[in-house]
Every structure is written in C-alpha cells, then in structure tokens.
Amino acid sequence: GAVVSQHPSWVICKSGTSVKIECRSLDFQATTMFWYRQFPKQSLMLMATSNEGSKATYEQGVEKDKFLINHASLTLSTLTVTSAHPEDSSFYICSASNSPTGRNEQFFGPGTRLTVL
Amino acid sequence: AQTVTQSQPEMSVQEAETVTLSCTYDTSESDYYLFWYKQPPSRQMILVIRQEAYKQQNATENRFSVNFQKAAKSFSLKISDSQLGDAAMYFCAYLQGGSEKLVFGKGTKLTVNP
C-alpha cells in the first residue's frame, strides 16, 4: 500500500515550452501533496505544498508563475513548468501525505528527470 | 527554524560489517518525528525507519536501528550486517508535530565494499 506514481519518469523539452508532470497516489487519498526539486548530489528542496481544492503554498524563492501546481483531486497533483529554460533542468519528486490516518508520513514518487535543451 | 545536520558526506563499510550514520537536529519543540530515508541509484526515496520523539525506546527495523538521544538532539542510524544493496544516499529528516513539512539533512553517501 501507499504507492505514489509520477508521469513521465523523464522528459526532454525545448527551451520556451511548458512541461506537465503528474503525481498520483494510487491506493490512498492524499489531502496534501508536496513537490521537491533535487539537484545532482544534493538534498531535496521543497518547492511547494498543495492541498486538494486550494491554492498551493510556495516556499520562499520559488516562482509560483513558473511552477504551476494544481491539486484537482485527492489522488492527483500536477506540476507545470512554464516557459522552461535549461536552468530548470533537474529531478522533480512529489510526495503524498496521508496524515489523516495519524501516521505523519510522506510517501514519495519515483521522480521525474527534466532536461531542457 | 528547525535544521538537520548530517556531518558525514560519505561513508564506506565492508559487506557484513556494521556502520553508523550520524544526524543531529535543532528544535525547541517537544512533539516531533524523525526519519531516515534511503535513496538508491534509482532515486526512489524509501523510508528506512521512523522515531516518535515521545517514545524513549529506539526504533528498530530488521538490520536497521537508531540511537535516539533526545537531550543531545541526536538521531544516528546503525546498519548491521551491511549488504551491497544498502549502498545509497541516506537522508535524515525531521517533522514537527502538527506540521507536514519534512526538513531534510544534506545526506550521507554510503558505499558498501564487497
């Protein structure tokens, strides 16, 4: 149980285009989903927290107009990188929380590698 | 703000031996949770072990155990009988009670030598 999927697992796009990454909780309802960015050989950096049906809360320094987050249902959150540039190339990881069960645990997706040419 | 420090960027261990990864954290809260996550080359984050701050007993999961020293704010991970599959990045993480934001350390890269 507690499986989180991400799609696509990797994507290559041209500079200036937009890319959408999906995060799904497959066997539980996630009231909260998180989006992280991870640079090579570094730790996870939280970008934003999204709650179903409400606007995402972005961390300081993260451009909300560039990284659009939508949490339309209890099992799906999407991250859209708008007008992508090479510096947006990174590994993006989502996680989902089932805190209502009292476990205070996040379950992580397998990540998406984005390369912007 | 809470911080998590992993002072060992890299560690190595011989197969079948025991290794301890260190983690310290800074908080003024009394209600919190601590985690160790493993990130193998596949980059999938895997929960290794968790510890509730209110529990005095150290958490154990098979070959993985922690030494939780609340007063010292220390949360080290001991891996016994190390296996080649244990090679990965290990991240220590803190979660304040009532919050959902994990605070990660910078990670320790563990190499297991055959």
Image (cartoon, rainbow, N blue to C red):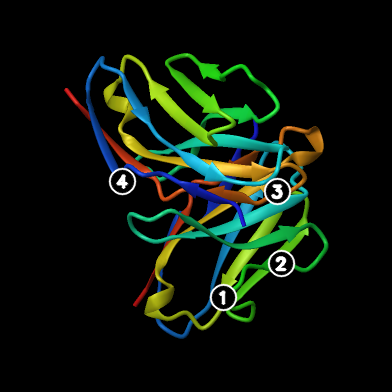
Residue at 81% of width from left, 39% of height from top? A100
Q: Label 4, on which residue?
A: B9
Looking at the rendered structure, the secondary structure element under dot 3 is loop
Q: Are marks 3 and 2 on the same chain?
A: no
Is A31 placed left or right of A34 in the picture? Answer: right
Task: Answer few, some or many: residues within 10 Å of disc 2's Cα (few below 14, many 20 plus, some between 14 and 19).
Answer: some
The percent position of residue A57, horizontal first and vertical second, equals 71, 67
Cα distance in 3D space between marks 4 and 1: 26 Å
| Label 3 vs label 4, nearer the camera | 4
| Label 4 vs label 1, nearer the camera | 4
Of B79 and B40, which appears nearest the observer?
A: B79
Q: Chain of mark 2?
A: A
| Label 2 vs label 1, nearer the camera | 1
Of A17 and B83, which appears nearest the observer?
A: B83
Residue at 59% of width from left, 58% of height from top? A35
Residues under numbered marks 3 and 2 in contact, where contact means CB atoms less than 8 Å apart: no
Q: Are marks 4 and 1 on the same chain?
A: no
Residue at 41% of width from left, 65% of height from top? A90
Is any atom of residue A72 visible in this view? yes
Which three-letter amino acid code belongs to the residue tagged 3? Glu
Indicate whether B102 appears above or below A47.
above
Q: Label 2, on which residue?
A: A57
